[in-house]
Image (cartoon, rainbow, N blue to C red):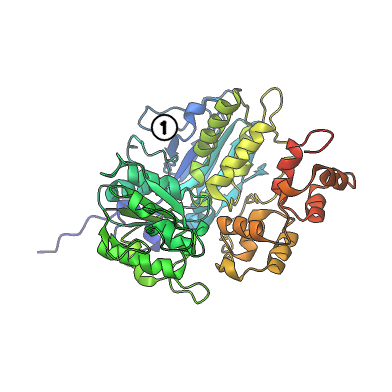
Amino acid sequence: MAARQAPEMPETEEDTLEPSRRPPLEHEILQPQITILWHPDRHLIGATAPVLWNSAGAFELSRWAPLFQHRNEAGSSLGDRRISRSPLLLKRQPQGAISLEPPSASMAVEINGSTAKCTVSLSRDSLRSGATICLSRRVGLCLHLSPPRGQREDDRLGLVGSSRCMAQLRQQIRQVAPTNASVLIRGETGTGKELVARAVHSLSRRAEREMVSINMATLGGELAAAELFGARQGAYTGARNNRPGLIREAHGSTFFMDEIGDTSPSVQVMLLRVLEEGRLRSLGDSRDQPVDVRFVAATDRALEADAERPFNQPLRRRLETFVLQLPALRERREDFGELFLAFLTEAENEFDRALRVPADLVCTLAAGDWPGNVRELRNLVTRLAINAGADGELPWNGFPADHYHPATAETAAPSAPRPRGPRYRDPATVNDSDLLRAMNENSWRVMPAARALGVSRTSMYALLEQSDTIRQTQQISGDEIRETMRQGPDLDAWAAQLRTPREALKRRIGEMEPGGES
């Protein structure tokens, strides 16, 4: 009797990448999807529709199709009268590429910030990153690859975004929060590590007590151990009273250590002992005392063995009992609209005015690189809101896109690999000459200079405060600033001449009175 033939599995794009030809698991299947980044009806922002190919390998996007589903609600079409009824045609191409053919109607179509008047092809790599589509300056979309979405759970964690990486992050938080396991939160600067730490604490059994947090980069010198572990009266010069220490203050709660990679070696050893034994000894004390603390730490750099800045590897392993990896903003481009809307709503509430946003502004920004991630986006939205016109329209024309490098519409050729950032550098090795050179080479902008030096944001501000060469803006007289301003209308030149950070100088100028000292 002939063996029964196994049913043939439907071919997917991922099947072609599987050497074993095994059927991929659900979470491994990447399906083209379209997410609304911006829409006049703000309620639709974040809604998603799967790209379902017809028998000819085509998909139509128009005013009435497809239906976008938001959260667990019924589907809605784009519906805007300025969107053509003639479809933008998507066609499936070899090797996972997709071509986009604009309609013959007069509707303006922009793909990745470039006007599309003929067929444009997007490679699979660009779809993984997410491609932006702007229709008639009214509706912004993101075409991306994502697993099929299930029903979205009610989110009470304060984490914005519907992307698969954010869904996975929420699931991991709910998984680890009820335990007492130590958690290490990894992610680039500005990705929201402290927000995630608070989410872990809020779902834990310790949530009734307030979480205690400290930025480890701010602890230096001999007092670091006393700040963390406490000290008995007379333990060191100036210790006039007993100090409980931050870890003891977190007894029964969560202790969050941001920038854990900047912890001094001696404190690392003491932290390891507390994590291993659940006991600590204050400076000047002769006895250990038990503490019940749940440790959560965060870092934006690698803690693995590094000759430039060694980190205690047993401590690293203790901290990373459970690791939460936060995605960069460029890795969750489909969430950009929801994030932009959340920050815009905050700004509208703060300034008590409605703000108008063109969709091509959101699309162009969504295609950017965003080295400062979500924090940088929030600051930008606030700045745009402050500069909005009398009619509430955000200042799009002439927008200073200094380091938002939108991608261009591309062919099926894979994109070039992303350049690696500078390696982490011990802030203690940065001298005034290094600091001055980095500020000069980066037009006196703090964050680009910090990236050039390879130090964290917090460490950079500490270096600026300690510098004998870089001047603190608030310590420069108003008369000297005005005299410098009379020499020309160039803020970069003013900052270089005064040897002070550009951003702080701009704020100081805005606070100065038109005449006299300030």
Q: Which residue is mark 1?
A: 70
Residue at the spot 44% in from the left edge and 55% down from the top edge: 240
Name the amino acid type tagged 1. His
Secondary structure state at the residue bearing disc 1: loop
Q: Residue furthest bottom?
A: 307
Residue at the spot 66% in from the left edge and 57% down from the top edge: 464
Q: Position of residue 270 (x, y in %)?
A: 36, 66
Crowd around label 1: few <14 · some 14–19 · many ≥20 (10 Å): many
Q: Residue furthest right?
A: 487
Q: Quadrant of the N terminus?
A: bottom left
> Does 111 sit above or below residue 413?
above
Q: Quadrant of the C terminus?
A: top right
Residue at the spot 61% in from the left edge and 22% down from the top edge: 353
Left or right for 92, reference 72: right
Location of residue 496 by image quarter: bottom right
> Does 394 sit above or below residue 234?
above
> Does 382 sit above or below residue 112?
above
Q: Is residue 28 visible?
A: no
Location of residue 6 by image quarter: bottom left
Q: Position of residue 155 (x, y in %)?
A: 36, 36
Front residue (pair 120, 173): 173
Left or right for 355, reference 283: right
Number of marks: 1
Front residue (pair 12, 139): 139
Q: Residue furthest left?
A: 1
Q: Position of residue 142 (x, y in %)?
A: 52, 42
Q: Is residue 252 visible?
A: yes
Front residue (pair 476, 310): 476
> Does 492 sit above or below residue 393?
below
Q: Position of residue 439 (x, y in %)?
A: 71, 60
